[in-house]
Image (cartoon, rainbow, N blue to C red):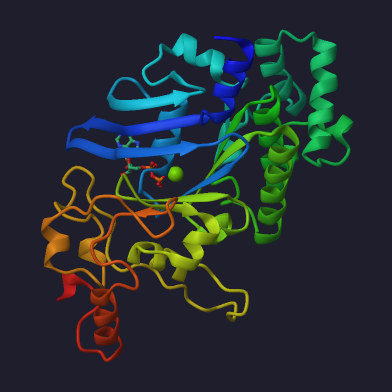
Amino acid sequence: MSELQTEMRQEHQPLLEVTDLRTHFRTERGLVRAVDGVSLTLERGKCLGIVGESGSGKTVLSRSLMGLLPSSNTVTSGSVKFEGKEILGLPSKQMRRLWGREMSMVFQNPMTSLNPLMKIGQQIAEPLNLHLDMSRADARATAERLLRDVRIPEATRRLDQYPHELSGGMRQRAMIAIALACGPTLLFADEPTTALDVTVQAQILQLIGEQRRDRNMSVVLVTHDLGVVAGHTDEIAVMYGGKLVEKAPTSVLFAHMKMPYTMSLMRSIPKLEDPSHTRLATIPGRPPDLVHPPKGCRFAPRCAYARDKCITEEPPLRQAEDPNHSYACWYPVGSPEFNQREAELNSGAVPVTLEAR
Ligand SMILES: Nc1ncnc2c1ncn2[C@@H]1O[C@H](COP(=O)(O)OP(=O)(O)O)[C@@H](O)[C@H]1O
Ligand SMILES: [Mg+2]
């Protein structure tokens, strides 16, 4: 193949291509189907949001994509292609070459991911030494520049501070600096703002967005809060019980969501105009047991719109009107059955969930 052809192929090839990925854990209770047949693609420079309730498999999914799972009790299958190359099941020595340089991760809790005994500057310099073979002086200068990039004031002084000397927001910025250090192509940010207050949250998300554009990096933003991803992603994938149940470009999802589950997630977003003590709508019932998941739609037992078919038959992912929009639901938002049930619910004629019926 000529260089031009190679280049053209790379342009059209998604950065990440995931097909029927399964990550199961062997436990005493049985096999935990934490990720159960997920397929998705991510283009270069784009930001994909992965949203779902706590326990829906978001962290296991992103760690599976990065090859960051304990090998002892993990069983994976399917395919994960990064720049066209299969990376699922790659020996950790080869995976390590990708970490930092090609993909890196910002974890949920900087306090447990930063080394408390090591100065911030050293923690940023370490991957630079390791992956880019930088000299100590160059690595320190780069670390300082990175601290400025992530808007940490007094960068020079911060290099010699320890994590506990920084505020929560500053620590999260330092984590992002470490993740950005080697110029990754793909950044995973797993609930990067959950521990932070709302104003700092917005700043961190803006920072990730800026860095993505400056570096033409792709980002996977993982969160339980649909509100967080609204203004910061190109596409959203919704997870429930280890499965991807709806996926669409962000604006399409917000305007035309199909899954009652997505609708519930939307209702649990706090609104600015709500009084500060308003109780958020939470989804009734519990997430499915991933050792013995429900036979039909995994959300059916908690769904106000479920019917018998939902309990017995699993809905496949199918395409909506927009070709980039897919969802797994027998009676989606706006269908005659959905509308009928909505009317019954409004008149109080039926209890809200099948479990209660
Ligand atoms: N190492 C493990 N062994 C067994 N079960 C696990 C392991 N890691 C995660 N799980 C289970 O996988 C499911 C998905 O977890 P996770 O991906 O962390 O959810 P989320 O990030 O969406 O909150 C949960 O039920 C969790 O208990
Ligand atoms: Mg998680």
| Residue 277 drawn at (x, y percent) | 55, 78
Q: Residue 41 appears in which quarter of the rendering?
A: top left
Quadrant occupied by the N terminus: top right
Quadrant occupied by the C terminus: bottom left
Camera-side residue: 284 or 346? 346
| Residue 96 drawn at (x, y percent) | 52, 15
Instruction: Name which residue lies at 45% across and 71% down.
Output: 267
Q: Is residue 1 left or right of residue 70?
A: right
Is residue 163 depicted above or below 101 in this figure?
below
| Residue 83 drawn at (x, y percent) | 52, 23
Camera-side residue: 166 or 229? 229
Camera-side residue: 13 or 157? 13
Instruction: Name which residue lies at 86% across and 41% down.
Output: 153
Q: Is residue 247 visible?
A: yes
Instruction: Name which residue lies at 41% across and 39% down.
Output: 40
Q: Residue 284 appears in which quarter of the rendering?
A: bottom left
Camera-side residue: 255 or 312? 255
| Residue 205 drawn at (x, y percent) | 66, 49
Q: Is residue 25 left or right of residue 203?
A: left
